[in-house]
Amino acid sequence: MLTLHLNAADLSRTVVRSAPSVLLEVAAAGQRVFLAGAPEHLAAWRARTRAALRPGMRPLLDLCRLPYWLPDFLTPPGHDADVAAAFDEVAAIPAATLDAELRPRIEAGDLPPRVAALAAGDPTARQRLRAAMAAFHTVAVAPYWRTILATVHADRAVRSHTMVDVGIDRVLRDLSPYLRWTSSGASYQLSYECAFGTELDVVPDGRGVTLVPSYFLPQPCVLDDPAGPLVLAYPIRPARRELTSGQPLADLLGRTRAAVLGAIVGGPSTSQVARTLGISVASASQHTATLRSAGLITTHRTGSAVRHALTPLGEQLLRAGRAGQVRSPEGISRR
């Protein structure tokens, strides 16, 4: 059991974050891929995501295979408005931090030996992790972000109304079926079953608590940043319908082909498209050929490279399909 021991100052500084954390959702989605079962609203998403996995995503998925643990450096605070900057920050984590978090898990057999290069801070391993995060985000999170965001906003709206109508005590009491809230006099405790099977006590000591609603997170987790408020991420109540992209462009072209169309910005080569999306060059070539035949892109040779550009029709379709949600992104202590 992990228990947060709060005082009156903590309660006065308790807030609900207005949006989910992109990095937390990416890491939690990675965990969901490995969990034996999936709740009803994630069953179809899990099947689609597993079918879309590629070898290039392995550096991330290696770190998400444990149901009760995620390395802290995968979800640093900040930068969530800029996905590229968030991925860059993860790739730039100090070598000492990587070693401290990963080495014990490798030695315990929880993580495969190939993670050792990342634990040692190898620059190539860092870039592979960044590429894996971007590729996995493209297929597992980005296509569904509008739905995730709307669901999280709805959950936050419920908390906001409860806060105004009843107060923070009811907000914390009804926050999640995984959490238990007790209050007696000046003593306030928020607790949940901890997978480690030990009793852990956390005291914010007046720093307050930032509540972060999560769509994919399978269980609550505490992110303790000594420089700021304590962060408690919690799973929102399950949706009543399955998670879908809600993207006409992805439905029309298929998720991967829509992502290829979105990646053709700035005249990329076929290999660059493949690297960006974490697919093979042969697959990228096949998709670009189909898009070219449909009049959505043009292709021309520059030296030894074959480069692609959007046609006016392709640009129009991309805008109409809200391509920002389907194209590849350019872009604390956990207990």
Image (cartoon, rainbow, N blue to C red):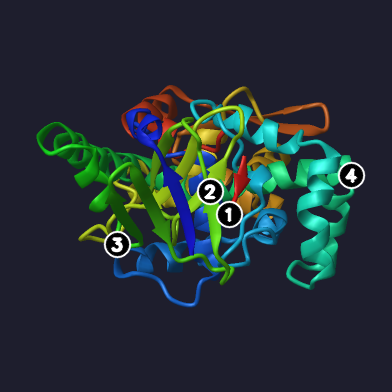
Residue at screen point 55% across, 32% down: 83
Rendered position, 141 above or below 297: below
Asked if marks 4 and 3 touch (Cβ < 8 Å), the reply is no
Disc ID at residue 177:
3
Asked if marks 4 and 2 touch (Cβ < 8 Å), the reply is no
Q: What residue is shown with label 4?
A: 122
Q: Is residue 138 visible?
A: no
Rendered position, 221 above or below 205: below
Select label 2 or label 3 by which is in front.
2
N-terminal of the pair, mark 3 or mark 1, is 3
- Please state which amino acid type lies under the numbered disc 2: Val
Front residue of 35 and 168: 168
Q: Residues within 10 Å of mark 1 (few under 14, many from 20)?
A: many
- Please state which amino acid type lies under the numbered disc 3: Pro
Select label 4 or label 2 by which is in front.
2
Rendered position, 257 above or below 29: above
Q: Residues within 10 Å of mark 2 (few under 14, many from 20)?
A: some
In this view, the residue farthest toward the left is 165
Front residue of 91 and 307: 91
Rounded to the nearest angstrom, the CA distance separating label 3 from label 1 is 18 Å
- Please state which amino acid type lies under the numbered disc 4: Asp
Q: What residue is shown with label 1?
A: 335
Residue 202 horizontal side relative to residue 185, left or right = right
Q: Quadrant of residue 216?
A: bottom left
Rounded to the nearest angstrom, the CA distance separating label 2 from label 3 is 20 Å
Query: Which element carries disc 4, helix, strand or loop?
Result: loop
Q: What residue is shown with label 2?
A: 202
Asked if marks 1 and 2 touch (Cβ < 8 Å), the reply is yes
